[in-house]
Amino acid sequence: MATLTMVQAVNDALKVAMRRDKGVLVFGEDVGPKGGVFLATEGLTKEFGKERCFDTPLSEDGIVGAAIGMALNGLKPVAEIQFQDFIFPAFDQIVSEAAKFRYRSGGQYTVPMVIRTPYGGGIRGGLYHSQSGEAYFCHTPGLKVVIPSTPEDAKGLLLASIEDPDPVLFMEPKALYRTTKADVPEGYYTTPLSTLRTARTGKDVTVFCYGAMVPVCMKAAEQAAEKGIECLVVDLRTLMPLDEEGVLEAARQTGRVVIVHEAPRFCGFGGEISAIIAENIIEYMEAPVARVTGFDTPFPNTLEHHYMPDARRVLDAIEHVHGY
Amino acid sequence: MSAQELLTVTAQDGSAVGHDPKLSSEGLLHCYRTMLTVRAFDDVCLKLQRSGRIGFSIPNKGVEACQVGAASALEKTDWIFPSYRDFGMALYHGVTPTEMMHNMFGNDRDTARGRQMPVHFSFDKPIRFVSISSPLGTQIPQAVGAAYAMKLRGEKHVALASFGDGSTSTLGFHSGLNFAGVWKAPVVFLCQNNGYAISCPTDEQTASESFAIKAKAYGMPGVRVDGNDLLAMRQVTAEAVARARRGDGPTLIEAVTFRMGGHSTSDDPTRYVPKELVESWAKKDPVARFERFLEKQKLWTKEQGEALYAAAVEQVTAAVKEAEGTPPPKLESIFTDVFATVPQHLRRQGQAAFELAARKGDAGAGDGKFPL
């Protein structure tokens, strides 16, 4: 075991993958000698050479487009988009190309690649360094969307994503990059995609969350426990393809559900969780589903702490559904 | 060669003085037959579309020499990242009209199992003719990535990205050429400037004095070539391919040609193309020019040409018969190939669709459940 921050765990996963498979390449803006703006790729160029870890021209469309070509031709590209807010020039390549190659070619051409990108608020990044765009991508058949919340999962899920035969958007909660250190197994291991993690067990209220909202929800769950409300906190980890059965099972256990994400509410991922529950297990529900989310506004800078769900807001929702 | 002057090898009368095409008589005839097959495929598909038997087609009349001349400079180990008006390249390398016709009918033997519109081909042998999508320019940086992989592994292969004049305005053109220049990737960019992007003429597409000259800003050579001259297309592409194989990096080729038909069977070019322009290009027909060249080599007579075209039509017609007689894809094909394995939620959606189809009595043969 090593004790690592999340960004160190990401770095470790990349090193392990590159040592294991010569076809794994890491590239993007400033990921080479500088090691990335968050240092996620620190030391890779030095260890693996500039043919396997390198800076690209400043073009997200080019980064993803070229990564697709590499993946079509047998490499395992792990491309970095410096901030998820800047991914949109590559939207066409991701949505129209990477996600559709297998389908449109009957499996002749496939795109096993990973796009890593830091997302989310909490760093005073304002409109363009804070967004959570997961819903855009979950709405794209053929693309997997993975979001870790712990250092151990960051490494295991990233290695599983690199091993996966399909394109994966790996969204890293940058607010958690350095907030905690935790034990991370050394060497190679994978955490299976499309599996949930039970972050806390409880019989009264189920809280669904992912990424940077997991520690927020854990804090709210602790405060709820002090008031005698035991929460089952579920870290979704893979949003697409989602473990729907696991979601339904966790919702059934308490019949009271709170869904938390920092992305805007309207058409957000919480709406899907809510709909799955309503469609399948409405008879088990003791209270209406509550969502705690970012507002349907652009992401504010100075007042970001009001925009982002915090333990105060989550606890309020937990108490509401518990008392319903 | 330069980015401004137009390279021509074959004069309109078919003479190619002092030029060595570096092809045997059989090789030259293969080029010719391929162009005739493109034309036959077009002619047959237009009739199929007009009679409602297929939904859509893309005509190639006028640009056959671009496709076949360029393809003739590639090896089977090279990769083609085509546009939707490039299937002559696939035919040249041995893809059959039957394989293509399965796509036109969207049947169960179509590579994409009927998921795409017609003409969106995908073939992985005998040459990599990479799956075509409808958004423009997206294949350009992809070709660069595939070429990077070749370079990294020390292979001497090249990737050819083919696109039209309209695509030079896309994000993909800029990022693709820029990346290729920086990486010195073994890639050939073929811009087929056929005068119009659907209805938008080139002078409304760019204020640049040519498309080829854009290469300069990306640090690579740009060449302008007569796209209706098969031998010139072959020569210029071969030089670009050789340069890429040597490790000297990418080239941008602008092939100046003209699309004699509509953008697609849904388009009426008489609404925007001046009649005189069509008439002037009709005199420069690439197939007729190559026939005059072959005639001078004593490889062609009018009767032989007609017989070869008739044989091509017969081959394509046989392909139609086979493709039309092949059943449509099974319902299951909607849900497979989204991911490598069918995930939980798609399995549930698929199962519901099968059950509904069975209940309503419109399930096809084999529609039941996932064979997984």
Image (cartoon, coloured by chain):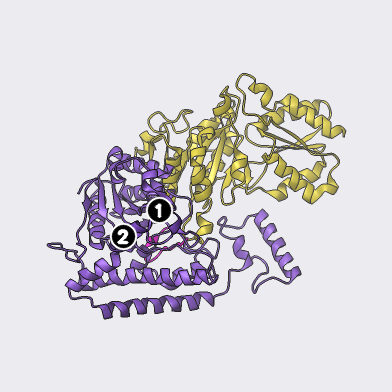
Chain colours: A yellow, B purple
- The numbered mark at residue A15 is none
Alpha-carbon distance for marks 1 and 2?
Answer: 39 Å
- The spot of residue A278 in percent (x, y) is 79, 47
Q: Is residue B40 left or right of residue B266?
A: left
- The spot of residue A221 in percent (x, y) is 75, 30
Q: Which residue is mark 1?
A: A73
* A317 is higher (above) or lower (below) than B303: above
Q: Quadrant of residue A1?
A: top right
Q: Which residue is mark 2?
A: B281
Res. B321 in view: yes
Element at label 1: loop
Residue placed most toward the observer, A223 or A188: A223
Residue placed most toward the observer, B36 or B262: B262
- The spot of residue A31 in percent (x, y) is 42, 33
Residue placed most toward the observer, A263 or B164: B164
Q: Are marks 1 and 2 in contact (CB under 8 Å)?
A: no
In the rendered view of the protein, which quadrant contains the C terminus of chain A? top right
Bounds of the magenta segment: B120-130
Picture residue at 39% right of the left edge, 52% below the top: B196
- The spot of residue A183 in percent (x, y) is 58, 33
Q: Is residue B129 magenta?
A: yes
Badge 1: how crowded within 10 Å, few (<14), some, or many (20+)? many
Q: Main secondary structure of the magenta part?
A: loop
Q: Is residue B138 magenta?
A: no
Residue placed most toward the observer, B133 or A159: B133
